[in-house]
Amino acid sequence: MNENHKIYKSIGEVAKLLNLVNKKTGKLSTHTIRFWEKEFKQIKPNIFSGKRRYYDSETINILKKIQFLLKNRGMTINGVRKYLNEQNSELDENYNKTINNTNIKTRLNKISNIIKNIKS
């Protein structure tokens, strides 16, 4: 693997990291990750040569969150999907609020300058 791909982990490495092991056979259970890919649009593996899946740290964190919510919190697939979608919309809302606050500050500065010019 070349230098650009060092930040990625293979599906097997991610399965090991998440401790996804088939209890009967003791083998890594990569099919769980593939299933989650189909269920959650937030999981976007990079597919390089050889058609192998590779995951960056952001995607791995999403997988960890999904696993925690499903296994530890007992949420359903639909519940986790809704949770992740709401989280993304909250981020979008915060981004939009920041943009709006910036626009308001810019407008206030312009109004302030106009008032200063009128007073002069």
Image: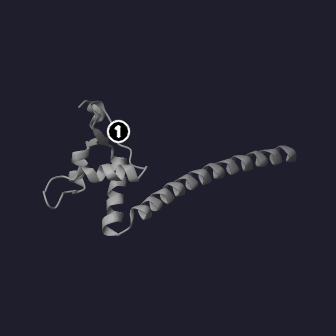
Q: Give the residue drawn at x 35%, y 69%.
A: 73
The quadrant where residue 4 appears: top left
Residue 18 placed where, x, y %? 25, 56
Q: Give the residue drawn at x 30%, y 51%.
A: 33
Instruction: Count all numbered tags in the image, as a single digit.
Output: 1
Q: Give the residue drawn at x 62%, y 48%.
A: 99
For label 1, the crowd category at 10 Å Cα-Cα, with few meaning under 14, some 14 to 19 and many 20 or more, is some
The residue lying toward the viewer, choosing from 51 and 119, is 51
For numbered disc 1, what is the local secondary structure?
Answer: strand
Residue 108 placed where, x, y %? 73, 50
Residue 88 placed where, x, y %? 49, 54
Please state which amino acid type lies under the numbered disc 1: Asn
Work out which quarter of the rendered image holds the C terminus and state it.
Answer: top right
Colour scheme in use? one colour
Residue 31 placed where, x, y %? 26, 50
Give the left or right position of residue 98, taking residue 22 as reference: right
Q: Is residue 76 visible?
A: yes
Label 1: which residue? 46
Relative to 109, does residue 86 appear above or below in the rendering? Answer: below
Q: Can residue 7 be seen in this view?
A: no
Work out which quarter of the rendered image holds the N terminus and state it.
Answer: top left
The quadrant where residue 64 appears: bottom left
Q: Give the residue drawn at x 34%, y 54%.
A: 63
Give the left or right position of residue 27, taking residue 34 as reference: left
